[in-house]
Amino acid sequence: EQDIQALVTEIHEQVSDDQIAILLESFPLKLRLTLWQALSDEAQQNIFIVMKHESRELLLSTLEDEQCLPLLTKLDAVHLLELSESLNDRFIDYAVSNMNAKQRSLYKKSCDYALDEVGHWQNFTEIQLPQRLKLSAVKKVCSKKLPSFTEVIYIVDDNGVLIGEIPVNAIFKAESDQEYRDSIDTDVEYLLSNEDIADASEKLIDLDRSALPIIDENRCLTGRLDLPTAYRYKEQTLEAQLNQSGGLVEEEDLFGNVWQSSKNRAVWLGINLVTAFLASWFIGLFEATIQQVVALAVLMPVVASMGGISGSQTITLIIRGLALGQINDSNKKSIIAKELKVGAINGVLWAIVIGAITFIWFDNPLLSLTIFISILGNIVIASLSGVWVPWILNKFNIDPALSGSVVLTTVTDIFGFIVFLGLGSLLLL
Amino acid sequence: EQDIQALVTEIHEQVSDDQIAILLESFPLKLRLTLWQALSDEAQQNIFIVMKHESRELLLSTLEDEQCLPLLTKLDAVHLLELSESLNDRFIDYAVSNMNAKQRSLYKKSCDYALDEVGHWQNFTEIQLPQRLKLSAVKKVCSKKLPSFTEVIYIVDDNGVLIGEIPVNAIFKAESDQEYRDSIDTDVEYLLSNEDIADASEKLIDLDRSALPIIDENRCLTGRLDLPTAYRYKEQTLEAQLNQSGGLVEEEDLFGNVWQSSKNRAVWLGINLVTAFLASWFIGLFEATIQQVVALAVLMPVVASMGGISGSQTITLIIRGLALGQINDSNKKSIIAKELKVGAINGVLWAIVIGAITFIWFDNPLLSLTIFISILGNIVIASLSGVWVPWILNKFNIDPALSGSVVLTTVTDIFGFIVFLGLGSLLLL
């Protein structure tokens, strides 16, 4: 017990809080709890903030309530907002009641915004100074330790309206009130608090700035969006896409609750089951044919999987193009034309290869012709579907990054089976 | 012609270079070239730098050589490094010969490092000042416009060895040489130029700093790694994973060269073909069985796809765990135990559901039993394979993020078919 305590203290001195959070996840739950208890209260509070969403939920659900509460006592508005989706209301209320008045009002302010609005993601570490402050007072404030990502100070009027900004080094260079006022840049880039966070993040990243001020509808400065927040938002989007392509609804802790994990994964298995049985049903329509030409059953996976891969290649490009706003009604035709060409080239190439292998294997020219036509048709159709499936989902406001590939595979599977088995019935019976 | 010119100039005034780069990609090649020609020389040079790798290659291959060269005349070391993988040697030589001596030596310096070393990614916008400089001189240098992400100034000795750093505002606050020297923080976080860029990026992001100094083996300051570069590296890694999961070897331009695109996609289609025929070969072993019980052929896609999804759910978690170093010999057993439990729960659940549907559909209790056992077995085996496939690939230094899912699907397909058709042969013939 005491050994663990000493070891954990030692590790905590060497390793950053973020790294400890990652490290903790590599231990099964029981051992993880022992290690957690060995951390000092302060270490627990800091590591709790940087843990992964799922691991934090897991921890809270394992600890006694009285052990959870200390973790929440020192949260400021920004931290609580980050945590709020993984905390239940009782804990949030407790955390809010433990804040000082300023942090509480900041928290309430951010809560007014939806999750996709800039205001929800703002932090309040910016330094803002009233316009009428004298240079000497300004210098005094700015000579203290500045928060990270502070290259400029924001200047506001008596009503809190954003007037302009001034680089930190320009403040100190100024030798008179006049010089100081002249150095204030009044033509500043800013974000609106109800702007879309995705657009705002792109804008901040494009401008190569470390933060941008956020103003509300009255042009009052409410906070700022910093570069790490912008990138973290972007990363989240990419990671959600990756999880989805792996068939997970939500990210999981490596040692997450078994029932929770099972539930998370059951969703996609269930969706997949519906589409798989749909494909089976279409195959079932050709039972008589398969019975007479079993080779068709043997070759089915080849037809289905070549179509599936082609389709997902196209859809990956199209989803990115839609996300960046590069695809619209006017260039849709040209994109389809290009995908058709690419599909035709790969279709012919692989139809020949597969047709030849089939001929060598089964020594049946008509079977060879059947699979030649099916592969060519399925790859071409898959390439086209890779364009129109996400396009249509997008029109209906369904995110194609999350549901596109299921719809697409269903289409290519079913089309592939119908053409292959249908053509087989015609040519081979 | 003149109208286009006016329109393009208008757009260029309104929209950032990054956005124009994205916009250009939404036009088919011919129109894109017309728009490109309408941009001013300076705009072309700036937009060229921020374009996507693939679009840049496409542009260079379309333009005449004499039109390409002006794009390269004003590149500095950092920009040329970013571009170097998409430029052929002739263009690189031209760009290098057009640099001034300082940029050329910086470029050479970065080229000495491998692509995965911090040194390759450094930029040279940091401000470094010799230790013996007087406060007045320091203030003079720092009162000019500072490069982005400059919160601290680095101090070096006569040999260029990094001594410490000082926040910009602390420089100006200092009133005597002594006070200035006392404010220099000599205990600074730094990166080594031959450190791994992935680790270094994580470190910079964890520290919540906007840049870190980079030193070489002699402790000399060589440059700095800034936050946008660190995040861009991380993003690249995520995007490569996303492209791979979509079956693309490389990202493509929406209107990329048709032959080039076809080649890019043919790689995965070819790999997939090998695994698909492998599965077919195993199905072929059971031709006699299928001929007598066609329902087995009808239900094959259900068995294969349920296994495929289960496996990819597990592998997604494991790949992330391996990348973060959370998985090691000591906790491997616990992870396998947990995945076994999750696999068993979903296996039993979906085996019952699928068994019941099969019974209703085919009214054959033995067929129902066959698929029950196969689904249960395949989901459990797939969950286990999701752990050991990436684990083994990792041991052999093969990136599981790029090749794991192909190997995994092959395993689950073949296992699923063997159990389902083998068991079918035993129970149903």
Image: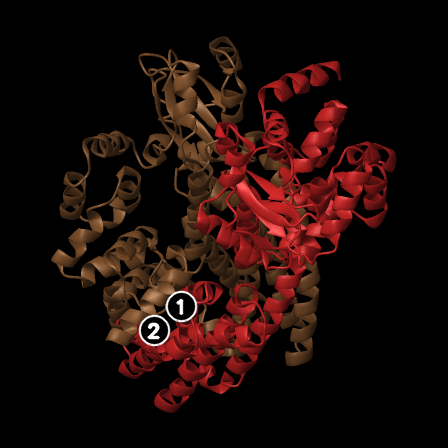
Chain colours: A red, B brown
Percent x, y of residue A139: 59, 27
Above/below status of B122 relative to B251: above
Percent x, y of residue A186: 52, 48
Residues at discs 2 and 1 both on one chain = yes
Amino acid carrying mark 2 in the image: Glu
Report the residue that reaches farthest toward the top: B178
Q: Residues within 10 Å of mark 2 (few under 14, many from 20)?
A: many
Residue that numbered label 1 is attached to: A314
Task: Give the quarter of the figure containing the N terminus of chain A.
Answer: top right
Task: Report the label total.
Answer: 2
Above/below status of B351 relative to B113: below
Q: Chain of mark 1?
A: A
Q: Which mark is residue A119?
A: none
Rounded to the nearest angstrom, the CA distance separating label 2 from label 1 is 7 Å
On the picture, is B268 further left or further right than A272? Answer: left
Task: Give the quarter of the figure containing the C terminus of chain A.
Answer: bottom left
State which quadrant residue A416 falls in. Answer: bottom left
